[in-house]
Amino acid sequence: MSAPNLLPIVSSPTLIAAVPGFGPTAGGNSVLLIGTNLGGATSVTFGGTPATIVSQDLFGFLITVVAPPHAAGNVPVVVTTPAGASTPANYTYVGPVVPSPPTVLVFTPPTGPTTGGTPFTIVGTNLTGASVTFGGVPAVGVTVVGGVLLTGVTPPHAAGNVPVVVTTPAGSTTVAGGFTYVGPPLPTAVSITPSVGATVGGTPIAIIGTNLTGATVTIGGVPATNVVVDATGTVLAALTPAGVAGNAAVVVTTPAGSATVSGGFTYV
């Protein structure tokens, strides 16, 4: 009669969970493995990559390991003991969060003066840390609230449409339609009264037009004197300079440009 087999029965390991069930792709974080029959573990792998075993409990329920580096995604965690490989537990490697570039949903106003100083508002997403340029020139006073609301003040720029670019550490976006800088309106000069005066000058004249604020006047290329413009910018009064007999061009000039009075002024 043969002797009975007295070797202990070794049960296969069962892995129930990895806690936490996720970690960085760089690894290096502690993970607690929970299961049964885990005692005497000889290796732990995450997606086939060996982890470092830090500790095991005496009853085979718990193992603490350090997760190895691995590409982002879900991987099986397997514990191997003298009895064999365990059932796998799921573990997710999470890559670094890549910030999203800014988006612009609303931009207002779309126009403003060339002198700058126009308050503007942008509504969008991912605006935290943003700066704004108008035609390459930085806006001033930029403030962002909650990453969705941006306010600022336009810088000075030459007249015309310019691109508006919002930039954050994650990237840039260009505002559709851009921003149009509008220069001061050009003057117009409709009429001059009287249109005839003495060559010695000193004739009081009145020029009717629009946008005459800040204007100067020349008659035959010589500046008129005592120029005064009314508050509406539509009536300009002056005294003619001395001139030679004949017709002379009358030119009204403002910071925005010039206008010539039809018919000019005739010296007699």
Image: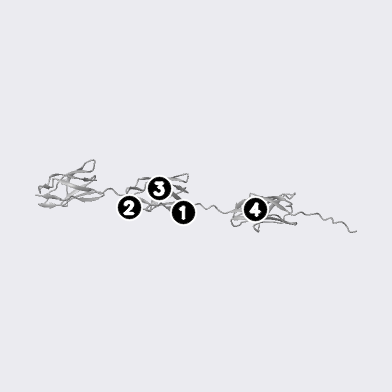
Relative depth, front residue between 110 and 204? 110
Amino acid residing under circle 1: Gly
Between the residue at mark 1 and the residue at mark 4, the CA separation in whole angstroms equals 35 Å
In front: label 3 or label 2 = 3
| Three-letter amino acid code at the position of disc 4 | Asn
Q: Earlier in the sequence, mark 1 or mark 2?
A: 2
First in residue order: circle 4 vs circle 2? 4
Could you tell whether 236 is left or right of 175 in the image? left
Q: CA distance from mark 3 to mark 2?
A: 17 Å
The secondary element bearing badge 4 is classed as strand
The residue tagged 2 is 160
The circle on residue 171 is 1
- Identify the residue position indicated by label 3 in the image: 107
Instruction: Specify the amino acid type for callout 2.
Output: Gly
Spatial separation of the CA atoms under disc 1 and disc 2: 26 Å
Of mark 3 and mark 1, the one earlier in the sequence is 3
Q: Alpha-carbon distance for marks 4 and 2?
A: 60 Å
Q: Count the labels in the image.
A: 4
Query: In the rendered image, which quarter is residue 205 located in?
Result: top left
Is residue 134 or residue 188 the one in the foreground? 188
Question: Real-space Cα distance between discs 3 and 1?
Answer: 18 Å
Residue 266, numbered label? none
